[in-house]
Image: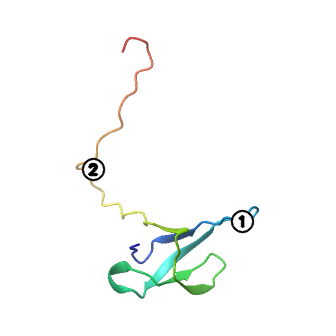
């Protein structure tokens, strides 16, 4: 598992009626993006997390550079039969 500051930690739950936990990684204490992570949760608390197999790192959205170079435009989908 590798992460960068600003990525989102998604911790799945296996308990019925309990929602998954999400938090923003604000500090990486391991080498080369490895755990443990200091995570800030939506309620404002921070915690040192050693993620288990039920957790995944969701990358933060890349910054928009204002260029469309290399970006493929949306493909057109034909709905008529015979195309």
- Residue to which mark 1 is pinned: 15
Tell me whether circle 2 and circle 1 mark residues in contact (CB < 8 Å). Answer: no
Q: Secondary structure at mark 1?
A: loop
Instruction: Pick whichever, 14 or 68, lies toward us.
Output: 14
Q: Residue at x 52, y 77 (%)?
A: 51
Q: How far apart are the alpha carbons under marks 2 and 1?
A: 44 Å
Q: Position of residue 80 (x, y in %)?
A: 43, 14
Q: Secondary structure at mark 2?
A: loop
Instruction: Pick whichever, 34 or 66, lies toward us.
Output: 34
Q: Nearer the viewer, mark 2 or mark 1?
A: 1
Q: Is residue 83 above or below residue 55?
A: above
Q: Position of residue 6 (x, y in %)?
A: 45, 74
Number of other residues with Cα within 10 Å of mark 2, as a class: few under 14, some 14 to 19, many 20 or more: few
- Residue to which mark 2 is pinned: 68
Q: Residue at x 76, y 62 (%)?
A: 17
Indicate left or right for 66 with 37 as reference: left
Q: Residue at x 23, y 48 (%)?
A: 70
């Amino acid at each position: 598992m590798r992460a960068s500051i600003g990525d989102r930690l998604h911790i799945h739950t296996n308990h019925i009626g309990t929602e998954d936990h999400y938090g923003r990684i604000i500090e990486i204490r391991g080498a080369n993006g490895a755990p443990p992570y200091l995570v800030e949760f939506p309620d404002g608390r921070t915690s040192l997390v050693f993620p288990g197999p039920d957790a995944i790192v969701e990358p933060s959205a890349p910054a928009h550079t204002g260029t469309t170079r290399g970006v493929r435009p949306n493909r057109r989908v034909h709905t008529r039969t015979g195309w």
